[in-house]
Amino acid sequence: MKIGSIKPQLIALREFFKTEATTLRIPSIQRQFVWDAEDIKELVDSIISGYPIGAVIIWEPTSSFPSAPLVGKDYKAGRRYVLDGQQRLTALMLIKNGWQLQRGAKNIPATPISYVPDNRRLYLSSKRGIDLSLIVNATLGDAESLTTLQRSYPKSYKQAIDDVGEKIVNYQLPFYVLRSQSDKGDEGYERIAEIFTRVNSAGVKIGNLEMFLSFFAAAFAKEHKDRIISMHERFSEHFELDLEPIVRLVFSRMGLNQNQITKVQSFRKSLEKLKTRFAGQKREVGHILDRAELAILVTTKLLEEEFGASTTQYIPSQNALLPLFDAVLQYGYRATTEIPSKEKRNLLKWFLVASFNGSYSTSANHKLEEDLTTIRAAKTFPVENLLAALNIRAPHRNRIEKNDVLDAYTNVLRGRTGKEYLMLLDVLLHRAKATDWSGKPMISEDSAVHHIFPREFLKEHGETREEMINCIANLTLISPSVNSEIGETPPDEYLTRFGEQVLRDHLIPTTPKLWKFKSFDQFLEVRLKLIWSHTRSLLEELEGTSKRAATVGS
C-alpha cells in the first residue's frame, strides 16, 4: 500500500460545523466518548485564548470499516475516519448541538456551559450567564438562535459574540488527511497502524487498533469476517463492547494465546497456521463464532440483570470481561436462568473484585492466559483459584477493603483514575433500586453524573480541591434533565424536593445540617461510610454469608 498524501490543512471551526462534521465517521475500534464537562470547558478556554489544541487525523482509505457517524443516526456515504481527535470533535459537536448528540443508536449528553460577559468567565451551568451553544449558533448565523440571544440579552449579546462566539467559530484547527492509494494485503493495514501509533497524540501504541487492522487484512472467509463485524456492531450498540475482547475470545477459542492475538506480527503469522488448520472446516469456525456470540450475550445479560451494567461505561477494563465470557462458553450456559445461583455469585464476585483492583491494568496477556487456562481446567467457575492468583500478582489485591472506600478521596472524573468507584456506585444504586430522580428507574447509560454539592457552588465558596469536588462521595447518577435543572443550586435548597427514600436509595445522608457548605467535608465522610456499608453488604451477598445472598441470581 502507498499513502497517496499526508496533507495538513487548517480548517476554521465555522467550516467544520457546516460541512466537515457530517462527512466524518468514528471507527468502531475507537474508545467511547469519555470526556466530562471540565474537559469540554478546558477545551473551550484553550480555543478562546488561542492556544493550540492538537491536530486531528483523518484517514481516507479505499475500503470500508465498521464505524458510526461522528454525529447522526447513520451516515454511510464516503470513507472518512477519525483516527485521532474523536474526543475533541465530539466535544465541539456537543456545543454546536445544544449539549446532546446522537451517534448511531447512542445518545451522548453533556453538562451545559455558560458565559458571563460581566466577568468574562465560563461556568458549568445552564442557569448562570448565556448558554455557550446559543452564542455559537447565533455566531454561525442561525436566525432563531440570534433572535433568542438578542431578546434575552439585549445589552450583552454583542459582547458575548465578540468575546466567545467569533473566537470559537474562526478558530483554525489543523487536520491531517491520510489518503490511501491502495489497501490490498496485510502490508496496507499494518502501515496505517504504524502511522497511527507514531502520530497518536498520547504517544501510546493502540494494540486493539493494530489488531483490528491486521484482522481485516487476514485471509479468512468473508462470511466469518462479516460475522465478527456483525457481532461487534450488535454488542457495541447494546453494551458498548470494544472489538478487542470479542477478537480475544474468538481466536483464543481457535487455539491462539493472548500474545499471539494482540501482537501484529505474531497474529498475522498465527492466522496463516489457523487457515491451514481450519481449511475446509467452515462449519467448525461457524460453531466457534456461534458459541462465542451466545456466551457474550449471556454474560452481558447477567451483568445487566444483577449489576445494572447495561454499558461498559464505568467498567475500568473490558479485559476483565474475557474470563466471564470464556467461563460461560466453557460450561455451556445458554441463558442466565441456566446458571446456578452459587455460580452466579462467584462470577459476579470475581468480576467486581478483579475490576475494582485493576487486575489487568498491566501484563494483561500473561494474566488472561493463566486465568483462561484455570477456567478451562475446572468443572465450575474456580473463583477461589482465580482470587488466589490475583493476590500473588501485581497489584497483589484480591479483596475490596474498608479503607479502599473510606479513604477514597480522589478525583474520579479524570481519565481512568477512580473509574472503579463509579462502577461500584453504579452497582450499588442498581442493587438499591434507585430512581433517576424523575420517577424512573436509574439506568446508568441514560443517566448523568451529578455533583450533590454542585461544582460551581463549591468553587464560588472557595473549595478548589478537585479530589474533594469530584470525590465519589459527592457524586451520584440521575436524569440528565434533572441534573441540568438543579444546576448550581445549593444542596440544602434542592435536596428538600426529593423524599427521604429517594435520597436513601442514593446513599445520601438525610440529615439537613450536612447539606450546608460548612459541613461539606463531614458530608463526604458520612457518605463514604454509607457507601462502604452497602459495599460490605453486597460482598457478603456474593460470598453467600448474608441472608440476602439468595437474591443474587435467584
Image: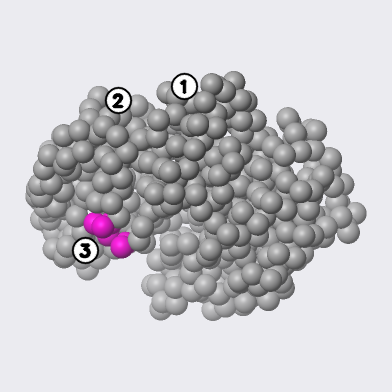
**Mark 1, residue position:** 223
Q: Residue at x 16, y 42 (%)?
A: 3
**Mark 2, residue position:** 76
**Of 419 and 287, which appears nearest the observer?**
287
**Callout 3: SS:** helix
Q: How is the image coloured?
A: one colour
Q: Residue at x 29, y 34 (%)?
A: 185
**Which amino acid, mark 1?**
Glu
Q: What label sits on residue 305 in the rendered view?
A: none
**Mark 3, residue position:** 46
**Callout 1: SS:** helix
Q: Residue at x 66, y 39 (%)?
A: 299
Q: Are marks 2 and 1 in contact (CB under 8 Å)?
A: no
Query: What stretch of residues is rendered in magenta?
Result: 198-203
Q: Are marks 3 and 1 in contact (CB under 8 Å)?
A: no
In percent of width and height, residue 462 lies at 41, 78
As measured in the structure, the alpha-carbon distance from the residue carrying label 2 to the one carrying label 1 is 21 Å
